Image (cartoon, rainbow, N blue to C red):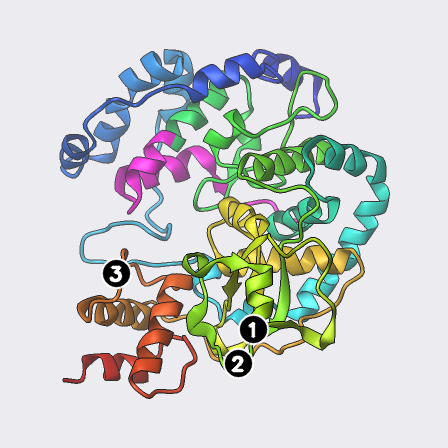
């Protein structure tokens, strides 16, 4: 939104922090269960039309904006994560489909790091000010910029309005996307040009990929011109990413995590936030940094938990609250590990010291079967979704340990067979 016309049209929302917070405070007091039941029998056009009263009354969207955005709008049924009758669920999110060794490809991380170091020099003063304001290290926000859009080289392919309308109508997380669609209409009402609103299949937009609702909670007008531009302004996008991390609990001057060696008396079945201890307690149990590196001073009373994103098939880490903050940006252990390592590389660090073994892509059906089997045997599996996280890995490892299996904390067909046996 670099043109004067676009900037002028956006002035009512840009930098208007009080207005943003009023919008954030909107409450959607409607019975979710009744609404979703009704929507199941609605056509797409009927569903969109049913949103008009809410868009008008709670999001202050004009009829002109609503009609312009929705006239002739058709659903995009090629999107992943839709609940379509007679069709299996499709998952495209790389964090939950690709093998860890592929997702955390060293060559790709190296190329991004080289570009990131160049941008660190180019925006040195802006990054220093962002770090002073929000306490988030420059390498971290650059890493997010790199992972999300390859530092702006990648433009998402989807129209945000169409994507969000489709997901709100028949997505598996339709209630969440309903709100995001309405926030997207609000952005249009405030003057954001629709052609700028190119989005991922999940509706995230801009250089650092914000959902529409996040434009009202985390954006920051770095330049002070009354306009936070996440589409064309690198400083605004980086500052907004830093602000989002801070809002999610980022702790100043704390590393995201440390690659380590698990002692023979322990294993990956200890991983996850539920097993959090102080660094002093981990060190007392024999956990050491890779390569014999010393632990930094001042960590003794800092809480950390064990994280093994590939189970026993790759590196393990002790991670801090800042790892959790990165996960709030994208709720994936692989994503947070990618961001952490890319930031380390931008600062001059190198590759993981423990190799990622080639274990193939993540298989949703196998993961779901493992989750179902663990739950049936009394393990605390709260959600059966076919996505692997620290809880599934930990419980898989504990089952393996209790049943004399090799403990690798990774869903496999062998593990499914063992769970289903007798």
Q: Residue at x 59, y 72 (%)?
A: 287
Q: State the CA–CA distance, disc 2 to disc 1.
A: 6 Å
**Based on the displayed image, in which of its 4 quarters is residue 64 positioned?**
top left
Residue 389 appearing in the image = no
Q: Neighbour class for label 3 at 10 Å: few (<14), some, many (≥20)?
A: few
Looking at the image, residue 343 sits to the left or right of residue 14; the answer is right
- Marker disc for residue 358: 2
Earlier sequence position, callout 2 versus callout 3: 3
Residue depth check, mark 2 versus mark 3: number of the one nearer the observer: 2
**Based on the displayed image, in which of its 4 quarters is residue 41 positioned?**
top left
Camera-side residue of 120 and 151 = 120
**Percent x, y for residue 316?**
56, 70
Residue 351 appearing in the image = yes
Q: Is residue 167 found inside the magenta-colored segment of the image?
A: yes
Q: Taking 70 as reference, is 363 above or below it?
A: below
Q: Neighbour class for label 1 at 10 Å: few (<14), some, many (≥20)?
A: some
> In the rendered image, which quarter contains the C terminus?
bottom left
Q: What type of secondary structure mainly makes up the magenta span?
A: helix
- Marker disc for residue 88: 3
**Percent x, y for residue 249?**
55, 39
- Marker disc for residue 133: none
Q: Neighbour class for label 2 at 10 Å: few (<14), some, many (≥20)?
A: few
Q: Which residues are magenta?
A: 153-179
Q: Taking 414 as reference, is 29 above or below it?
A: above
How many numbered circles are shown?
3
Camera-side residue of 356 and 237 = 356
Residue, disc 1: 101
User: The residue tagged with tag 3: helix, strand or loop?
Assistant: loop
Looking at the image, residue 169 sits to the left or right of residue 122; the answer is left
**Percent x, y for residue 369?**
25, 71
User: The residue tagged with tag 2: helix, strand or loop?
Assistant: loop
Marks 2/1 in contact by CB < 8 Å: the verdict is yes
């Amino acid at each position: 939104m670099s043109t004067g016309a676009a900037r002028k049209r956006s002035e009512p929302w840009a930098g208007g922090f009080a207005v943003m917070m009023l919008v954030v405070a909107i409450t959607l007091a409607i019975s979710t269960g009744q609404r979703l039941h009704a929507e199941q029998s609605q056509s797409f056009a009927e569903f969109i039309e049913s949103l008009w009263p809410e868009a008008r009354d709670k999001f202050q969207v004009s009829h002109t904006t609503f009609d312009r955005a929705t006239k002739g709008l058709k659903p995009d049924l090629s999107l992943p994560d839709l609940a379509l009758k007679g069709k299996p669920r499709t998952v495209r999110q790389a964090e939950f489909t690709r093998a860890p060794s592929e997702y955390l490809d060293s060559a790709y991380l190296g190329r991004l790091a080289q570009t990131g170091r160049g941008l660190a020099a180019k925006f040195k003063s802006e990054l220093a000010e962002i770090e002073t304001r929000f306490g988030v290290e420059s390498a971290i926000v650059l890493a997010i910029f790199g992972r999300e859009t390859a530092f702006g080289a990648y433009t998402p392919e989807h129209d945000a309005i169409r994507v969000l309308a489709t997901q709100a109508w028949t997505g598996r997380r339709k209630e969440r996307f309903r709100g995001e669609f309405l926030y997207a209409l609000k952005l249009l009402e405030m003057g954001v040009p629709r052609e700028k609103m190119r989005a991922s299949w999940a509706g995230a937009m801009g250089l650092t990929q914000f959902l529409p609702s996040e434009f009202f909670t985390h954006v920051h007008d770095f330049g002070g011109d009354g306009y936070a531009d996440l589409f064309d302004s690198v400083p605004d996008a980086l500052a907004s990413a830093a602000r989002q991390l801070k809002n999610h609990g980022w702790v100043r001057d704390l590393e995201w995590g440390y690659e380590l060696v698990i002692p023979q008396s322990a294993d990956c079945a200890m991983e996850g936030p539920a097993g959090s201890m102080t660094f002093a307690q981990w060190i007392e149990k024999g956990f050491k940094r890779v390569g014999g590196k010393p632990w930094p001073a001042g960590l003794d009373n800092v809480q950390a938990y064990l994280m093994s994103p590939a189970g026993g098939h790759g590196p393990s880490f002790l991670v801090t609250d800042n790892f959790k903050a990165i996960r709030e940006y994208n709720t994936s252990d692989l994503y947070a590990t990618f961001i952490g390592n890319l930031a380390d590389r931008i600062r001059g660090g190198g590759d993981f010291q423990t190799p990622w073994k080639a274990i193939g892509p993540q298989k949703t059906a196998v993961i779901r079967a493992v989750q179902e089997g663990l739950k049936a045997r009394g393990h605390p599996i709260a959600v059966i979704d076919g996505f692997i996280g620290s809880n599934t890995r930990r419980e898989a490892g504990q089952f393996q340990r209790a049943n004399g299996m090799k403990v690798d904390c990774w869903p496999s067909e062998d593990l499914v067979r063992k769970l289903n046996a007798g």
